[in-house]
Image: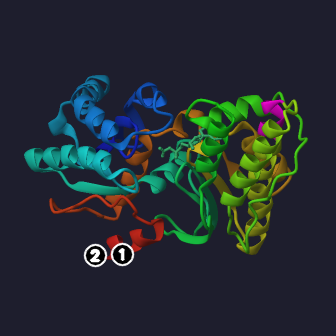
Amino acid sequence: MIILGIESSCDETAISIIKDSKLLANVVSSQIDVHKKYGGVMPEIASRLHLENIGFVLKKALEDANIKIEDIDAVAVTRGPGLIGALHVGLQAAKTISLMYNKPLIPVHHLIGHIYANEFIENFEFPMLCIVVSGGNTEFVIMEKDLDFKIIGQTLDDAVGECFDKVARVLGLPYPGGVEIDKLAKLGTHKYLFKSPHADGYNFSYSGLKTSIINEVNKLKMRKEDYKIEDIAKSFQDVAIDVIVEKAKKACKEYNVKMLCLAGGVSANSYLRSEMEKAFKNSDIKLLLPPLWCTTDNAAMICKAAEHLYKEKIFADLSLGVDPNWQIEDFKDFKNN
Ligand code: KG4
């Protein structure tokens, strides 16, 4: 079975081709250098660049896989969540391929893709806890079986990645800020006491942490005190991440978890990865850390999720629209249609 997957939810135009779980092509055209100039992703520019790039990305993927487009068995596409205009580019390309070559159209949830990226390392064992940490989401998701998602906790305001990006901006660092903070924190000392993002149960609240850093930096500047941004980065990163690790330990016990995975852009964070490894080193729970290339947007993960959706015959017709705010739990409604 050959699936062609398309991902265009944010600032990467990506197309991959998978054959019986083996990746034949994985092409990613990143727009990051363009958006960097603006300090963040500009939605209108993102849509235009997807339109410009999607043709050659498709051509390159077919060449790399050494197949003809008619050889595919299905076309899968991210239909949300993401930027509305950006999502539409991928969806229209997928619908065109589906119509022209009479292939089933598979709608994929972006975060389900990030979760299934972990299957490039190992097959899943259930119950499984998925910690989805990205620029738009901070969610603890329990899977009792394939394609079954229950949110047990989430952020009540800002996402953890958004918080990394905003703090980076306050510190004068370029976009995407998470990578820069990760690097600087390695050189810093935990000197400052910032507000913990802890909230009830498995929930989080990152907006207070962001404000406490803005206040501290303003105070230091007003008083003309010397400070090292490395120390602020380290003090911030510790509180931003430690709470995730602590809640993960609790959730694993409560839900009898056999396997645990990280997913999304922030899962590239070196401190989060090492703290999770430390926390679960001597336990029976298997920890999956996605390969670094899978923590940024790509279509290989869309293909991986699509293999499961294909088996369940979860197909859409040509009336399929994008859903910029598609919740992972609402995926069930789509499944039952
Ligand atoms: O949201 P995301 O998964 O990408 C999209 O779906 O578009 O990942 C982007 C987020 C950004 O907030 C970025 O700052 C963060 O992931 N990020 C990191 C690191 N690398 C990327 N945050 C912390 N540490 C990192 N090493």
Within 10 Å of disc 2 (Cα), the crowding (few <14, some 14-19, many 20+) is few
Crowd band around label 1 with a 10 angstrom C-alpha radius: few (<14), some (14–19), many (20+)? few
User: Where does the image place residue 3, in percent across and percent down from the top left?
Assistant: 30, 44
Asked whether residue 93 is in view, the answer is: yes
Which residue is disc 1 drawn over? 333
Residue 83 is covered by the magenta coloring? no
Does 230 lie within the magenta span?
A: yes
Question: What whole-number distance in Å separates the C-alpha atoms at marks 1 and 2?
Answer: 6 Å
Badge 2 amino acid: Asn
- Tag count in the figure? 2
SS for dot 2? loop
The image quadrant where one finds ligand 1 is top right
How is the structure coloured here? rainbow
**Can you tell which quarter of the image residue 335 is in?**
bottom left
Residue 277 shows in the view: no
Residue 337 is marked as 2
Towards the viewer: 219 or 12: 219
Looking at the picture, tell me which residue is in the foreground, 49 or 330. Answer: 49
Q: Is mark 1 on a helix, strand or loop?
A: helix
Which three-letter amino acid code belongs to the residue tagged 1?
A: Asp
Q: Nearer the viewer, residue 163 or 266?
A: 163
What residue is shown at x 65% (from left), y 31% (from top)?
172
Classify 33 as above or below 282.
above
Q: Main secondary structure of the magenta part?
A: helix
- The reply to whether callout 1 and callout 2 are in contact (CB within 8 Å) is yes
Q: Tell me the residue at 83%/56% (across/down).
A: 283
x and y percentages locating residue 165 in the rendered image = 60, 42
| Magenta-highlighted residues | 228-234
Q: Which residue is situated farthest in the left direction here?
A: 100
Q: x, y (%) of residue 17?
A: 33, 37
- Residue 313 location in percent, x, y? 29, 64
Residue at 75%, 74% in the rendered image? 254
